[in-house]
Image (cartoon, rainbow, N blue to C red):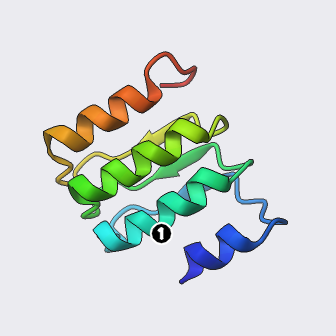
Amino acid sequence: AIFAALRDNKENKIESWDLPSQGINTEIAKVLAEYVSVSGVLTTLNLRFNNVGNEGALALASALRVNGVLNNIDLRFNALGDEGKEAIRDAVSGREGF
């Protein structure tokens, strides 16, 4: 719910989010991806040691394709799967910071 509220708040100024081991699963990652897709200030996102999963990674990859500001995302230890890893890799390929 917090990610959806932040997504809709145009005055949001969160530049860095450190969220390791927060129980972020696929469904939460999808909502977080909606936030990432519209954030104009978030530059760093740490999701290490969660359970984003393959579908969550696909949603985040789609968000990364439209977000030109985020230049550091940590998805280690998230059971992404090959498809999710490839989607993230493709989404950030050639971007500064990745």
In the displayed image of the protein, which residue is found farthest to the right?
11
Q: Position of residue 8 (x, y in %)?
A: 71, 72
Give the image quarter of residue 82. top left
- Which residue is at a point 46% across and 28% down the rendered structure image? 92
Q: Is residue 91 above or below residue 1?
A: above
Q: Is residue 70 above or below residue 95?
A: below
Give the image quarter of residue 4. bottom right
Q: Secondary structure at mark 1?
A: helix
Nearer to the camera, 10 or 79 = 10
- Which residue is at a point 47% across and 69% down the rendered structure image? 31
- Which residue is at a point 54% across and 21% down the rendered structure image? 95
Nearer to the camera, 58 or 23 = 58
Q: Position of residue 68 (x, y in %)?
A: 65, 34
Q: Which residue is mark 1?
A: 31
* Circle 1 residues within 10 Å: few <14, some 14–19, many ≥20: some
Q: Position of residue 18 (x, y in %)?
A: 51, 58
Q: Is residue 20 left or right of residue 85?
A: right
Q: Label 1 amino acid?
A: Val
Q: Is residue 61 above or below residue 90?
A: below
Q: Is residue 11 left or right of residue 4?
A: right
Q: Is residue 53 above or below residue 6?
A: above
Q: Position of residue 77 (x, y in %)?
A: 22, 51
- Which residue is at a point 45% across and 63% down the rendered structure image? 19
In the displayed image of the protein, which residue is found farthest to the top?
94
Total marks placed: 1
